[in-house]
Amino acid sequence: MRLAYRAESIRAVEAPALAAGEPLMERAAYAVASAAVAEARRRGLALVGARALVLVGGGNNGGDGLFAAAYLARRGLLVTAALLRERVHPEGLAAARRAGVRLLPTTTPPPPPPPAPTPDRAAGRADAEASSGHSAESAESADSAQGVDSADRGESADRADRAELAPVLAAAEAAEIWVDAIAGIGLTGGLRGVSGEVARALNERRERSAVAPLVVAVDLPSGLEADGGAVPGEVLRADITVTMIGLKPALLLPPAAAEAGDVQVVDLGLAEAVAARPAVVRRLLDADVADLWPVPGPADHKYTRGVLGLVAGSDAYPGAAVLSSSGALRTGCGMVRYLGPAGAARMVLARHPEVVTAPGRVQAMVMGSGIAAGEPVPEAAAQAIADPGVALVVDAGGLDWLPADPTALARRRVVLTPHAGELARLLDGRGEPVERAAIEADPGRWAQRAAELTGAVVLLKGPVTVVAGPEGAWYSQADGTGWLATAGSGDVLAGIVGALLAGSDGPPAVLAAAGALVHGRAGVLAAHGAPITASDVAASVPEAIRGILAH
Ligand SMILES: NC(=O)C1=CN([C@@H]2O[C@H](COP(=O)(O)OP(=O)(O)OC[C@H]3O[C@@H](n4cnc5c(N)ncnc54)[C@H](O)[C@@H]3O)[C@@H](O)[C@H]2O)[C@@H](O)CC1
Ligand SMILES: [K+]
Protein backbone atom coordinates (compact mmCIF):
# COMPACT_ATOMS: atom_id res chain seq x y z
CA MET A 1 0.00 0.00 0.00
CA ARG A 2 1.21 3.49 -0.71
CA LEU A 3 0.36 5.97 2.01
CA ALA A 4 0.35 9.76 2.02
CA TYR A 5 0.61 12.01 5.06
CA ARG A 6 -0.45 15.57 5.64
CA ALA A 7 2.27 18.23 5.84
CA GLU A 8 1.60 18.65 9.56
CA SER A 9 2.39 14.96 10.11
CA ILE A 10 5.62 15.29 8.16
CA ARG A 11 6.60 18.31 10.25
CA ALA A 12 5.71 16.50 13.47
CA VAL A 13 8.00 13.63 12.49
CA GLU A 14 10.76 15.94 11.34
CA ALA A 15 10.86 18.15 14.42
CA PRO A 16 12.31 15.73 17.00
CA ALA A 17 14.82 14.42 14.48
CA LEU A 18 16.01 17.95 13.72
CA ALA A 19 16.16 18.74 17.44
CA ALA A 20 18.34 15.65 17.88
CA GLY A 21 20.70 17.06 15.26
CA GLU A 22 19.99 14.55 12.51
CA PRO A 23 21.26 15.93 9.20
CA LEU A 24 17.93 15.64 7.40
CA MET A 25 18.62 18.30 4.84
CA GLU A 26 21.95 16.74 3.88
CA ARG A 27 20.22 13.40 3.38
CA ALA A 28 17.42 14.99 1.38
CA ALA A 29 19.83 16.88 -0.84
CA TYR A 30 22.01 13.83 -1.39
CA ALA A 31 18.93 11.85 -2.45
CA VAL A 32 17.87 14.57 -4.87
CA ALA A 33 21.32 14.81 -6.43
CA SER A 34 21.57 11.00 -6.68
CA ALA A 35 18.17 10.74 -8.36
CA ALA A 36 19.14 13.43 -10.86
CA VAL A 37 22.45 11.73 -11.60
CA ALA A 38 20.87 8.29 -11.99
CA GLU A 39 18.21 9.51 -14.38
CA ALA A 40 20.69 11.64 -16.35
CA ARG A 41 22.89 8.55 -16.77
CA ARG A 42 19.88 6.49 -17.81
CA ARG A 43 19.25 9.10 -20.49
CA GLY A 44 22.82 8.77 -21.70
CA LEU A 45 23.95 12.20 -20.53
CA ALA A 46 27.67 12.67 -19.81
CA LEU A 47 27.73 14.11 -16.32
CA VAL A 48 31.01 16.00 -16.32
CA GLY A 49 30.39 19.31 -17.97
CA ALA A 50 26.61 18.83 -18.10
CA ARG A 51 24.70 21.91 -17.01
CA ALA A 52 22.20 21.99 -14.20
CA LEU A 53 19.97 24.83 -13.08
CA VAL A 54 18.69 24.75 -9.51
CA LEU A 55 15.71 27.02 -8.78
CA VAL A 56 15.96 28.10 -5.17
CA GLY A 57 13.09 29.45 -3.06
CA GLY A 58 13.37 31.07 0.33
CA GLY A 59 12.54 28.13 2.60
CA ASN A 60 13.99 24.78 3.53
CA ASN A 61 12.94 23.39 0.15
CA GLY A 62 15.38 25.89 -1.32
CA GLY A 63 17.90 24.71 1.29
CA ASP A 64 17.56 21.17 -0.01
CA GLY A 65 18.13 22.55 -3.51
CA LEU A 66 21.28 24.46 -2.56
CA PHE A 67 22.87 21.44 -0.88
CA ALA A 68 21.87 19.33 -3.88
CA ALA A 69 23.49 21.94 -6.13
CA ALA A 70 26.70 21.51 -4.13
CA TYR A 71 26.58 17.72 -4.55
CA LEU A 72 26.02 18.05 -8.28
CA ALA A 73 28.86 20.53 -8.65
CA ARG A 74 31.18 18.12 -6.85
CA ARG A 75 30.15 15.45 -9.37
CA GLY A 76 31.56 17.64 -12.12
CA LEU A 77 28.36 19.28 -13.37
CA LEU A 78 28.29 23.00 -14.15
CA VAL A 79 25.63 24.17 -11.74
CA THR A 80 23.79 27.48 -11.59
CA ALA A 81 21.54 28.27 -8.63
CA ALA A 82 18.85 30.85 -9.41
CA LEU A 83 18.01 32.57 -6.12
CA LEU A 84 14.35 33.50 -6.42
CA ARG A 85 14.24 35.17 -3.01
CA GLU A 86 16.37 37.85 -1.42
CA ARG A 87 16.95 35.56 1.53
CA VAL A 88 17.72 31.92 0.97
CA HIS A 89 18.91 29.14 3.28
CA PRO A 90 22.26 30.50 4.59
CA GLU A 91 24.08 27.20 5.20
CA GLY A 92 22.86 25.86 1.87
CA LEU A 93 24.09 28.99 0.16
CA ALA A 94 27.50 28.67 1.80
CA ALA A 95 27.75 25.00 0.77
CA ALA A 96 26.79 25.83 -2.81
CA ARG A 97 29.34 28.61 -2.98
CA ARG A 98 32.09 26.40 -1.56
CA ALA A 99 31.33 23.77 -4.22
CA GLY A 100 31.69 26.33 -7.02
CA VAL A 101 28.00 26.72 -7.85
CA ARG A 102 27.30 29.89 -9.86
CA LEU A 103 24.82 32.03 -7.94
CA LEU A 104 22.24 34.01 -9.86
CA PRO A 105 20.17 36.48 -7.85
CA THR A 106 16.87 37.49 -9.40
CA THR A 107 15.36 40.03 -7.08
CA THR A 108 15.69 43.79 -7.19
CA PRO A 109 17.61 45.53 -4.40
CA PRO A 110 15.53 46.12 -1.28
CA PRO A 111 15.41 49.51 0.48
CA PRO A 112 18.53 50.51 2.47
CA PRO A 113 19.30 48.17 5.38
CA PRO A 114 18.53 49.15 8.97
CA PRO A 115 21.49 49.36 11.37
CA ALA A 116 23.56 46.66 13.09
CA PRO A 117 22.75 42.99 12.61
CA THR A 118 22.17 40.66 15.57
CA PRO A 119 25.27 38.47 16.03
CA ASP A 120 23.55 35.09 15.59
CA ARG A 121 22.30 35.97 12.16
CA ALA A 122 25.52 37.44 10.91
CA ALA A 123 26.79 34.31 9.14
CA GLY A 124 23.69 33.75 7.08
CA ARG A 125 23.46 37.39 6.16
CA ALA A 126 27.04 37.56 5.03
CA ASP A 127 26.44 34.70 2.62
CA ALA A 128 23.32 36.19 1.17
CA GLU A 129 24.94 39.58 0.84
CA ALA A 130 27.97 38.22 -0.89
CA SER A 131 25.87 36.36 -3.40
CA SER A 132 23.19 38.84 -4.22
CA GLY A 133 25.23 41.95 -3.91
CA HIS A 134 22.87 43.52 -1.44
CA SER A 135 21.89 43.12 2.16
CA ALA A 136 19.60 40.26 3.12
CA GLU A 137 18.58 41.79 6.38
CA SER A 138 15.78 44.03 5.28
CA ALA A 139 14.18 41.10 3.48
CA GLU A 140 14.64 39.00 6.59
CA SER A 141 13.00 41.55 8.81
CA ALA A 142 10.11 41.75 6.35
CA ASP A 143 9.87 37.96 6.63
CA SER A 144 9.73 37.93 10.37
CA ALA A 145 7.18 40.70 10.41
CA GLN A 146 4.85 39.03 7.92
CA GLY A 147 5.78 35.38 8.00
CA VAL A 148 6.31 35.64 4.25
CA ASP A 149 8.67 37.64 2.11
CA SER A 150 7.78 40.30 -0.37
CA ALA A 151 7.21 37.96 -3.28
CA ASP A 152 4.60 36.05 -1.26
CA ARG A 153 2.64 39.26 -0.94
CA GLY A 154 2.59 39.55 -4.70
CA GLU A 155 4.76 42.65 -4.84
CA SER A 156 7.43 40.92 -6.85
CA ALA A 157 4.91 40.05 -9.50
CA ASP A 158 4.98 43.72 -10.48
CA ARG A 159 8.75 43.92 -10.33
CA ALA A 160 9.40 40.61 -12.08
CA ASP A 161 10.03 42.10 -15.47
CA ARG A 162 11.60 40.13 -18.28
CA ALA A 163 14.99 41.77 -17.76
CA GLU A 164 15.27 40.22 -14.27
CA LEU A 165 14.22 36.79 -15.43
CA ALA A 166 16.27 36.78 -18.61
CA PRO A 167 19.43 35.35 -16.96
CA VAL A 168 17.38 32.56 -15.37
CA LEU A 169 15.74 31.73 -18.67
CA ALA A 170 19.09 31.76 -20.42
CA ALA A 171 20.51 29.40 -17.78
CA ALA A 172 17.45 27.18 -18.19
CA GLU A 173 17.91 27.14 -21.95
CA ALA A 174 21.49 25.96 -21.55
CA ALA A 175 20.82 23.36 -18.87
CA GLU A 176 20.10 19.67 -19.38
CA ILE A 177 18.85 19.29 -15.82
CA TRP A 178 16.52 21.54 -13.82
CA VAL A 179 16.17 21.01 -10.10
CA ASP A 180 13.01 22.59 -8.74
CA ALA A 181 13.55 23.69 -5.15
CA ILE A 182 11.26 26.72 -5.17
CA ALA A 183 8.81 25.49 -2.55
CA GLY A 184 7.65 22.28 -0.90
CA ILE A 185 5.26 21.68 1.95
CA GLY A 186 5.52 25.32 3.03
CA LEU A 187 3.56 26.63 0.03
CA THR A 188 0.05 27.95 0.49
CA GLY A 189 -1.87 29.49 -2.37
CA GLY A 190 -0.51 29.23 -5.89
CA LEU A 191 3.01 30.28 -6.76
CA ARG A 192 3.18 34.04 -6.83
CA GLY A 193 5.63 36.70 -7.83
CA VAL A 194 8.96 35.80 -9.40
CA SER A 195 8.45 32.10 -8.66
CA GLY A 196 5.19 31.97 -10.58
CA GLU A 197 6.74 33.86 -13.50
CA VAL A 198 9.69 31.50 -13.60
CA ALA A 199 7.51 28.40 -13.44
CA ARG A 200 5.31 29.68 -16.26
CA ALA A 201 8.26 30.64 -18.46
CA LEU A 202 10.03 27.33 -17.86
CA ASN A 203 6.92 25.26 -18.57
CA GLU A 204 6.56 27.12 -21.86
CA ARG A 205 10.21 26.65 -22.69
CA ARG A 206 10.00 22.98 -21.97
CA GLU A 207 7.04 22.51 -24.28
CA ARG A 208 8.89 24.23 -27.09
CA SER A 209 12.34 22.68 -26.70
CA ALA A 210 13.35 19.87 -29.01
CA VAL A 211 15.31 18.09 -26.26
CA ALA A 212 13.36 18.52 -23.05
CA PRO A 213 15.46 18.98 -19.90
CA LEU A 214 15.25 16.50 -17.06
CA VAL A 215 13.16 18.18 -14.34
CA VAL A 216 13.66 16.92 -10.80
CA ALA A 217 11.33 18.32 -8.15
CA VAL A 218 12.43 18.49 -4.55
CA ASP A 219 9.68 17.14 -2.27
CA LEU A 220 6.81 18.42 -4.46
CA PRO A 221 6.56 20.06 -7.87
CA SER A 222 6.56 23.72 -6.88
CA GLY A 223 3.11 25.24 -7.02
CA LEU A 224 1.27 22.23 -5.58
CA GLU A 225 -0.17 22.39 -2.09
CA ALA A 226 0.87 19.29 -0.21
CA ASP A 227 -2.45 18.35 1.39
CA GLY A 228 -4.86 18.29 -1.55
CA GLY A 229 -5.28 17.28 -5.17
CA ALA A 230 -6.10 20.69 -6.62
CA VAL A 231 -3.68 22.56 -8.87
CA PRO A 232 -3.90 26.09 -7.48
CA GLY A 233 -2.03 27.85 -10.29
CA GLU A 234 1.18 27.51 -12.25
CA VAL A 235 3.10 24.34 -11.33
CA LEU A 236 6.53 23.43 -12.59
CA ARG A 237 5.90 19.97 -14.04
CA ALA A 238 8.46 17.35 -13.04
CA ASP A 239 9.81 14.17 -14.58
CA ILE A 240 10.89 12.92 -11.17
CA THR A 241 9.80 14.04 -7.73
CA VAL A 242 12.03 13.08 -4.83
CA THR A 243 9.81 13.42 -1.81
CA MET A 244 11.00 13.42 1.78
CA ILE A 245 9.90 11.23 4.69
CA GLY A 246 6.61 10.10 3.11
CA LEU A 247 4.24 10.78 0.24
CA LYS A 248 2.09 13.89 0.45
CA PRO A 249 -1.61 13.76 -0.56
CA ALA A 250 -0.94 15.89 -3.66
CA LEU A 251 1.34 13.14 -4.96
CA LEU A 252 -1.49 10.59 -5.00
CA LEU A 253 -4.60 12.69 -5.64
CA PRO A 254 -5.77 13.87 -9.07
CA PRO A 255 -5.18 16.10 -10.87
CA ALA A 256 -2.13 17.32 -8.87
CA ALA A 257 -0.38 13.96 -8.94
CA ALA A 258 -0.02 14.13 -12.72
CA GLU A 259 2.43 17.04 -12.31
CA ALA A 260 4.93 14.95 -10.35
CA GLY A 261 6.20 12.37 -12.85
CA ASP A 262 7.85 9.36 -11.19
CA VAL A 263 7.76 9.77 -7.44
CA GLN A 264 10.59 8.48 -5.28
CA VAL A 265 10.17 8.47 -1.51
CA VAL A 266 13.26 9.04 0.60
CA ASP A 267 12.42 8.31 4.22
CA LEU A 268 15.45 10.18 5.68
CA GLY A 269 15.62 7.44 8.33
CA LEU A 270 12.15 8.35 9.64
CA ALA A 271 10.08 5.54 8.11
CA GLU A 272 8.96 4.14 11.45
CA ALA A 273 8.05 7.49 12.89
CA VAL A 274 5.93 8.47 9.91
CA ALA A 275 4.20 5.07 9.82
CA ALA A 276 2.83 5.86 13.27
CA ARG A 277 0.99 8.90 11.89
CA PRO A 278 -2.44 8.72 10.24
CA ALA A 279 -2.32 8.27 6.47
CA VAL A 280 -4.93 10.42 4.72
CA VAL A 281 -4.56 8.96 1.25
CA ARG A 282 -3.93 5.32 0.42
CA ARG A 283 -3.27 3.55 -2.83
CA LEU A 284 -3.81 -0.19 -2.91
CA LEU A 285 -1.20 -2.33 -4.62
CA ASP A 286 -1.71 -5.85 -5.94
CA ALA A 287 -0.54 -7.45 -2.70
CA ASP A 288 -3.15 -5.50 -0.71
CA VAL A 289 -5.92 -6.64 -3.00
CA ALA A 290 -4.67 -10.24 -2.85
CA ASP A 291 -4.80 -10.05 0.97
CA LEU A 292 -8.43 -8.95 1.07
CA TRP A 293 -9.73 -11.02 -1.86
CA PRO A 294 -12.51 -13.47 -0.90
CA VAL A 295 -10.93 -16.71 -2.10
CA PRO A 296 -13.39 -19.60 -1.57
CA GLY A 297 -12.26 -22.39 0.75
CA PRO A 298 -13.23 -26.09 0.78
CA ALA A 299 -16.27 -25.47 3.03
CA ASP A 300 -17.74 -22.71 0.87
CA HIS A 301 -20.88 -23.02 -1.23
CA LYS A 302 -22.69 -20.48 -3.36
CA TYR A 303 -24.56 -18.90 -0.45
CA THR A 304 -21.50 -18.51 1.78
CA ARG A 305 -19.74 -16.85 -1.17
CA GLY A 306 -22.42 -14.19 -1.27
CA VAL A 307 -25.42 -13.38 -3.42
CA LEU A 308 -25.57 -10.13 -5.35
CA GLY A 309 -28.83 -8.57 -6.50
CA LEU A 310 -28.94 -6.29 -9.54
CA VAL A 311 -31.50 -3.61 -10.23
CA ALA A 312 -29.83 -2.28 -13.35
CA GLY A 313 -30.74 -1.66 -16.95
CA SER A 314 -33.98 -0.32 -18.36
CA ASP A 315 -35.90 -0.40 -21.60
CA ALA A 316 -33.85 2.61 -22.69
CA TYR A 317 -30.48 1.13 -21.58
CA PRO A 318 -30.87 -2.65 -21.40
CA GLY A 319 -27.18 -3.29 -22.08
CA ALA A 320 -26.23 -2.02 -18.62
CA ALA A 321 -28.00 -5.05 -17.14
CA VAL A 322 -25.78 -7.37 -19.14
CA LEU A 323 -22.60 -5.43 -18.41
CA SER A 324 -23.05 -5.16 -14.65
CA SER A 325 -23.99 -8.87 -14.59
CA SER A 326 -20.81 -9.65 -16.54
CA GLY A 327 -18.65 -7.60 -14.17
CA ALA A 328 -20.19 -9.28 -11.13
CA LEU A 329 -20.02 -12.84 -12.48
CA ARG A 330 -16.39 -12.45 -13.53
CA THR A 331 -15.50 -11.10 -10.10
CA GLY A 332 -16.90 -14.26 -8.63
CA CYS A 333 -19.60 -14.12 -6.01
CA GLY A 334 -21.82 -17.17 -5.33
CA MET A 335 -24.84 -16.03 -7.32
CA VAL A 336 -26.15 -13.04 -9.25
CA ARG A 337 -29.88 -12.33 -9.05
CA TYR A 338 -31.13 -10.03 -11.77
CA LEU A 339 -34.20 -8.11 -10.59
CA GLY A 340 -34.72 -5.56 -13.37
CA PRO A 341 -37.29 -5.32 -16.22
CA ALA A 342 -38.26 -8.39 -18.22
CA GLY A 343 -36.77 -7.25 -21.53
CA ALA A 344 -33.37 -6.64 -20.01
CA ALA A 345 -33.65 -9.91 -18.05
CA ARG A 346 -34.03 -11.83 -21.33
CA MET A 347 -30.84 -10.19 -22.62
CA VAL A 348 -28.99 -11.02 -19.42
CA LEU A 349 -30.07 -14.68 -19.56
CA ALA A 350 -29.19 -14.96 -23.23
CA ARG A 351 -25.65 -13.83 -22.39
CA HIS A 352 -25.33 -15.35 -18.92
CA PRO A 353 -27.59 -18.36 -18.31
CA GLU A 354 -26.09 -18.69 -14.81
CA VAL A 355 -27.91 -15.54 -13.65
CA VAL A 356 -31.02 -16.14 -11.50
CA THR A 357 -34.04 -13.92 -12.05
CA ALA A 358 -36.15 -15.12 -9.12
CA PRO A 359 -36.31 -12.78 -6.11
CA GLY A 360 -34.68 -13.93 -2.89
CA ARG A 361 -32.13 -13.07 -0.23
CA VAL A 362 -29.07 -11.02 -1.23
CA GLN A 363 -26.02 -9.80 0.70
CA ALA A 364 -25.48 -6.84 -1.60
CA MET A 365 -27.43 -5.00 -4.25
CA VAL A 366 -26.25 -2.95 -7.24
CA MET A 367 -28.85 -0.43 -8.24
CA GLY A 368 -29.19 2.33 -10.80
CA SER A 369 -26.74 1.45 -13.61
CA GLY A 370 -28.47 2.01 -16.94
CA ILE A 371 -31.40 3.77 -15.30
CA ALA A 372 -31.97 7.42 -16.12
CA ALA A 373 -32.01 10.09 -13.43
CA GLY A 374 -35.50 10.89 -12.18
CA GLU A 375 -36.93 7.38 -12.62
CA PRO A 376 -38.98 6.14 -9.66
CA VAL A 377 -37.35 3.66 -7.30
CA PRO A 378 -38.21 0.03 -8.22
CA GLU A 379 -39.62 -2.17 -5.48
CA ALA A 380 -36.55 -4.45 -5.24
CA ALA A 381 -34.29 -1.41 -4.77
CA ALA A 382 -36.60 0.15 -2.17
CA GLN A 383 -36.52 -3.09 -0.18
CA ALA A 384 -32.74 -3.23 -0.27
CA ILE A 385 -32.46 0.41 0.82
CA ALA A 386 -34.74 -0.34 3.75
CA ASP A 387 -32.85 -3.49 4.81
CA PRO A 388 -29.83 -2.63 6.97
CA GLY A 389 -28.37 -6.09 6.33
CA VAL A 390 -27.90 -5.45 2.61
CA ALA A 391 -24.80 -3.68 1.30
CA LEU A 392 -25.54 -1.24 -1.52
CA VAL A 393 -23.75 -0.08 -4.65
CA VAL A 394 -25.63 2.91 -5.99
CA ASP A 395 -24.92 4.09 -9.51
CA ALA A 396 -26.34 6.55 -12.08
CA GLY A 397 -30.14 6.98 -11.74
CA GLY A 398 -30.08 5.14 -8.41
CA LEU A 399 -28.33 8.11 -6.81
CA ASP A 400 -31.71 9.86 -6.73
CA TRP A 401 -33.14 7.10 -4.52
CA LEU A 402 -30.90 7.71 -1.54
CA PRO A 403 -32.42 8.97 1.70
CA ALA A 404 -31.92 12.69 2.26
CA ASP A 405 -30.75 12.14 5.85
CA PRO A 406 -27.06 11.08 5.93
CA THR A 407 -27.50 9.35 9.28
CA ALA A 408 -29.95 6.92 7.62
CA LEU A 409 -27.01 5.15 6.00
CA ALA A 410 -24.72 5.35 9.04
CA ARG A 411 -23.16 1.97 9.85
CA ARG A 412 -24.50 0.65 6.52
CA ARG A 413 -22.11 -0.61 3.85
CA VAL A 414 -22.97 1.71 0.98
CA VAL A 415 -20.83 2.71 -2.00
CA LEU A 416 -21.92 5.37 -4.49
CA THR A 417 -20.25 5.22 -7.90
CA PRO A 418 -20.92 8.54 -9.68
CA HIS A 419 -18.87 10.19 -12.38
CA ALA A 420 -18.24 13.93 -12.03
CA GLY A 421 -21.49 14.93 -13.76
CA GLU A 422 -23.56 12.64 -11.53
CA LEU A 423 -21.74 13.90 -8.46
CA ALA A 424 -22.56 17.49 -9.45
CA ARG A 425 -26.23 16.53 -9.66
CA LEU A 426 -26.08 14.74 -6.30
CA LEU A 427 -24.41 17.70 -4.57
CA ASP A 428 -26.85 20.11 -6.16
CA GLY A 429 -29.71 18.01 -4.84
CA ARG A 430 -28.26 18.38 -1.36
CA GLY A 431 -27.99 22.14 -1.50
CA GLU A 432 -24.37 22.44 -2.70
CA PRO A 433 -24.43 23.49 -6.33
CA VAL A 434 -21.04 22.90 -7.95
CA GLU A 435 -20.02 22.71 -11.59
CA ARG A 436 -18.78 19.48 -13.07
CA ALA A 437 -15.53 21.25 -14.02
CA ALA A 438 -14.97 22.26 -10.41
CA ILE A 439 -15.36 18.64 -9.35
CA GLU A 440 -12.87 17.54 -11.99
CA ALA A 441 -10.44 20.19 -10.72
CA ASP A 442 -10.55 18.75 -7.18
CA PRO A 443 -12.16 15.30 -7.17
CA GLY A 444 -10.87 14.40 -3.71
CA ARG A 445 -12.47 17.40 -2.09
CA TRP A 446 -15.88 16.89 -3.68
CA ALA A 447 -15.96 13.15 -3.21
CA GLN A 448 -15.26 13.82 0.44
CA ARG A 449 -18.00 16.40 0.64
CA ALA A 450 -20.48 14.01 -0.95
CA ALA A 451 -19.48 11.32 1.55
CA GLU A 452 -20.22 13.72 4.40
CA LEU A 453 -23.57 14.73 2.91
CA THR A 454 -24.77 11.19 2.18
CA GLY A 455 -23.13 9.12 4.92
CA ALA A 456 -21.91 6.72 2.19
CA VAL A 457 -18.56 5.84 0.68
CA VAL A 458 -18.19 7.74 -2.59
CA LEU A 459 -16.21 6.21 -5.44
CA LEU A 460 -15.75 9.04 -7.93
CA LYS A 461 -14.91 7.72 -11.40
CA GLY A 462 -12.33 9.52 -13.51
CA PRO A 463 -8.87 9.02 -15.02
CA VAL A 464 -7.78 8.43 -11.41
CA THR A 465 -10.51 6.94 -9.22
CA VAL A 466 -10.95 8.54 -5.84
CA VAL A 467 -12.77 6.80 -3.01
CA ALA A 468 -13.81 8.92 -0.03
CA GLY A 469 -15.32 7.61 3.16
CA PRO A 470 -17.36 9.58 5.67
CA GLU A 471 -14.48 9.16 8.14
CA GLY A 472 -12.28 11.44 6.09
CA ALA A 473 -9.58 9.37 4.37
CA TRP A 474 -9.21 8.67 0.68
CA TYR A 475 -8.15 5.89 -1.59
CA SER A 476 -6.73 6.96 -4.91
CA GLN A 477 -6.36 4.33 -7.64
CA ALA A 478 -4.60 5.03 -10.91
CA ASP A 479 -4.59 1.56 -12.43
CA GLY A 480 -6.52 2.10 -15.64
CA THR A 481 -6.02 3.37 -19.15
CA GLY A 482 -7.73 6.04 -21.21
CA TRP A 483 -9.26 3.20 -23.29
CA LEU A 484 -11.58 2.53 -20.35
CA ALA A 485 -13.43 5.76 -21.10
CA THR A 486 -16.11 3.93 -23.08
CA ALA A 487 -19.84 3.46 -22.63
CA GLY A 488 -20.74 0.71 -20.21
CA SER A 489 -17.37 0.67 -18.47
CA GLY A 490 -18.94 2.07 -15.30
CA ASP A 491 -21.67 -0.61 -15.36
CA VAL A 492 -18.95 -3.25 -15.27
CA LEU A 493 -17.30 -1.46 -12.35
CA ALA A 494 -20.57 -1.37 -10.39
CA GLY A 495 -20.89 -5.14 -10.89
CA ILE A 496 -17.32 -5.73 -9.72
CA VAL A 497 -17.75 -3.63 -6.55
CA GLY A 498 -21.14 -5.22 -5.87
CA ALA A 499 -19.70 -8.73 -6.11
CA LEU A 500 -16.92 -7.78 -3.69
CA LEU A 501 -19.39 -6.35 -1.17
CA ALA A 502 -21.54 -9.49 -1.48
CA GLY A 503 -18.57 -11.78 -1.01
CA SER A 504 -16.62 -10.01 1.73
CA ASP A 505 -17.39 -8.41 5.08
CA GLY A 506 -14.55 -5.91 4.62
CA PRO A 507 -14.99 -2.15 4.96
CA PRO A 508 -16.72 -0.74 1.89
CA ALA A 509 -14.11 1.92 1.08
CA VAL A 510 -11.27 -0.56 0.73
CA LEU A 511 -13.44 -2.98 -1.25
CA ALA A 512 -14.47 -0.13 -3.57
CA ALA A 513 -10.79 0.75 -4.08
CA ALA A 514 -9.98 -2.90 -4.74
CA GLY A 515 -12.80 -2.99 -7.30
CA ALA A 516 -11.35 0.08 -8.99
CA LEU A 517 -7.93 -1.57 -9.17
CA VAL A 518 -9.33 -4.78 -10.70
CA HIS A 519 -11.43 -2.80 -13.19
CA GLY A 520 -8.44 -0.68 -14.18
CA ARG A 521 -6.19 -3.70 -14.55
CA ALA A 522 -8.80 -5.56 -16.60
CA GLY A 523 -9.00 -2.54 -18.88
CA VAL A 524 -5.24 -2.48 -19.36
CA LEU A 525 -5.12 -6.21 -20.08
CA ALA A 526 -8.04 -6.03 -22.49
CA ALA A 527 -6.77 -2.97 -24.31
CA HIS A 528 -3.15 -3.88 -24.92
CA GLY A 529 -2.83 -0.40 -26.38
CA ALA A 530 -5.93 -0.61 -28.60
CA PRO A 531 -9.64 0.27 -28.27
CA ILE A 532 -11.87 -1.96 -26.14
CA THR A 533 -15.54 -2.35 -25.36
CA ALA A 534 -16.99 -2.59 -21.87
CA SER A 535 -17.69 -6.28 -22.59
CA ASP A 536 -13.96 -6.77 -23.21
CA VAL A 537 -13.22 -5.22 -19.83
CA ALA A 538 -15.57 -7.62 -18.06
CA ALA A 539 -14.08 -10.56 -19.96
CA SER A 540 -10.60 -9.61 -18.73
CA VAL A 541 -11.55 -9.42 -15.05
CA PRO A 542 -10.59 -13.07 -14.30
CA GLU A 543 -7.15 -12.55 -15.87
CA ALA A 544 -6.68 -9.42 -13.76
CA ILE A 545 -7.65 -11.30 -10.60
CA ARG A 546 -5.42 -14.23 -11.50
CA GLY A 547 -2.44 -11.90 -11.83
CA ILE A 548 -3.21 -10.20 -8.54
CA LEU A 549 -3.67 -13.46 -6.61
CA ALA A 550 -0.44 -14.83 -8.04
CA HIS A 551 1.34 -12.21 -5.96
N1 LIG B 1 13.51 21.20 8.10
C1 LIG B 1 14.38 20.43 7.46
O1 LIG B 1 15.56 20.30 7.76
C2 LIG B 1 13.92 19.67 6.35
C3 LIG B 1 13.08 20.28 5.44
N2 LIG B 1 12.77 19.68 4.32
C4 LIG B 1 12.38 20.50 3.17
O2 LIG B 1 11.81 21.70 3.62
C5 LIG B 1 10.58 21.93 2.98
C6 LIG B 1 9.69 22.71 3.89
O3 LIG B 1 10.38 23.91 4.14
P1 LIG B 1 9.66 25.26 4.57
O4 LIG B 1 8.76 25.01 5.67
O5 LIG B 1 10.76 26.22 4.79
O6 LIG B 1 8.79 25.66 3.35
P2 LIG B 1 9.10 25.63 1.78
O7 LIG B 1 10.50 25.84 1.47
O8 LIG B 1 8.45 24.41 1.24
O9 LIG B 1 8.24 26.83 1.31
C7 LIG B 1 8.48 28.14 1.81
C8 LIG B 1 9.03 28.95 0.71
O10 LIG B 1 8.22 28.81 -0.42
C9 LIG B 1 8.14 29.99 -1.10
N3 LIG B 1 6.73 30.38 -1.15
C10 LIG B 1 5.80 30.21 -0.20
N4 LIG B 1 4.61 30.64 -0.61
C11 LIG B 1 4.81 31.08 -1.87
C12 LIG B 1 3.96 31.63 -2.85
N5 LIG B 1 2.65 31.77 -2.64
N6 LIG B 1 4.49 31.99 -4.04
C13 LIG B 1 5.80 31.79 -4.27
N7 LIG B 1 6.65 31.26 -3.39
C14 LIG B 1 6.15 30.91 -2.21
C15 LIG B 1 8.99 30.99 -0.38
O11 LIG B 1 10.25 30.98 -0.98
C16 LIG B 1 9.04 30.44 1.00
O12 LIG B 1 10.20 30.80 1.66
C17 LIG B 1 10.09 20.58 2.61
O13 LIG B 1 9.19 20.61 1.53
C18 LIG B 1 11.38 19.86 2.28
O14 LIG B 1 11.78 20.12 0.95
C19 LIG B 1 13.30 18.36 4.05
O15 LIG B 1 14.49 18.52 3.45
C20 LIG B 1 13.50 17.57 5.31
C21 LIG B 1 14.38 18.29 6.22
K1 LIG C 1 9.85 21.89 -5.04
Image (cartoon, rainbow, N blue to C red):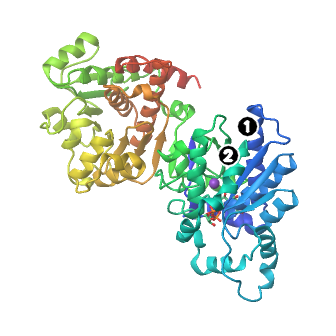
Is the N terminus in the top left, top right, bottom left or bottom right quadrant?
top right
Q: Callout 1: helix, strand or loop? A: helix
Is the C terminus in the top left, top right, bottom left or bottom right quadrant?
top right
Which of the four quarters of the rendered structure image does ligand 1 lie in? bottom right
* Nearer-N-terminus badge (1/2): 1
Q: Which mark is residue 39?
A: 1
Q: How many marks?
A: 2
Q: Is residue 326 left or right of residue 88?
A: left
Q: Are marks 1 and 2 in contact (CB under 8 Å)?
A: yes
- The three-letter amino acid code for the residue at tag 1 is Glu
Can residue 337 be seen in the rendering of this structure? Answer: yes
In the rendered image of this protein, does residue 86 appear above or below residue 437? below
Q: Position of residue 460 (x, y in %)?
A: 37, 41
Observer-nearest residue: 402 or 263? 263
What residue does disc 2 label?
216
Which residue appears at 45% of the width and 34% of the height? 514
